[in-house]
Image: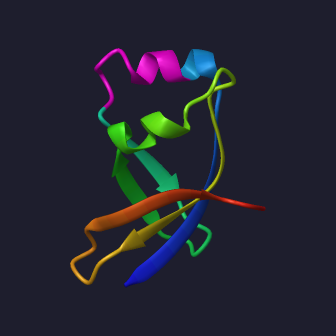
């Protein structure tokens, strides 16, 4: 298993453009220096009135398939 962390700061108005159906994934740069593309629907539970903000951790299996996504402190 592999754990990667990254930060997101996307305003509510910016997110509207993502959820119009034109964008299906977010591409992020991890703290480990890797570019990672994640399906947008995995982030829905983290969206608040202010948008999508915070530090996140993904857990990938040996095939690099997403196993877990969570918001972390710091």
Counting labels gives 0
Give the residues in magenta.
15-23
Q: Residue at x 51, y 72 (%)?
A: 4
Pick the quarter of the image with the C terminus. Answer: bottom right
Residue closest to the far left: 63
Residue 1, by quadrant, is bottom left
Residue closest to the far front: 45
Residue 60, above or below 38: below
Q: Residue at x 57, y 75 (%)?
A: 32
Residue 22, by quadrant, is top left
Q: Position of residue 65 (x, y in %)?
A: 25, 68
Residue 9, by quadrant, is top right
Q: Residue at x 60, y 15 (%)?
A: 13
Q: Position of residue 50 (x, y in %)?
A: 69, 24
Residue 69, above or below 65: above
Pick the residue in front: 1 or 23.
1
Residue 31, above or below 12: below
Q: Position of residue 64 (x, y in %)?
A: 28, 73
The answer to whether 9 appears left or right of 44 in the picture is: right
Q: Reply yes or no: does residue 20 show up in magenta.
A: yes
Q: Residue at x 33, y 67 (%)?
A: 67
């Amino acid at each position: 298993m592999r754990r990667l962390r990254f930060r997101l700061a996307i305003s509510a108005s910016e997110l509207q453009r993502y959820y119009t159906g034109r964008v299906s994934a977010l591409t992020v740069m991890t703290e480990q220096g890797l570019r990672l593309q994640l399906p947008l629907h995995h982030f829905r539970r983290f969206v608040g009135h202010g948008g999508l903000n915070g530090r996140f951790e993904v857990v990938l299996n040996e095939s690099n398939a997403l196993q877990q996504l969570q918001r972390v402190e710091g």
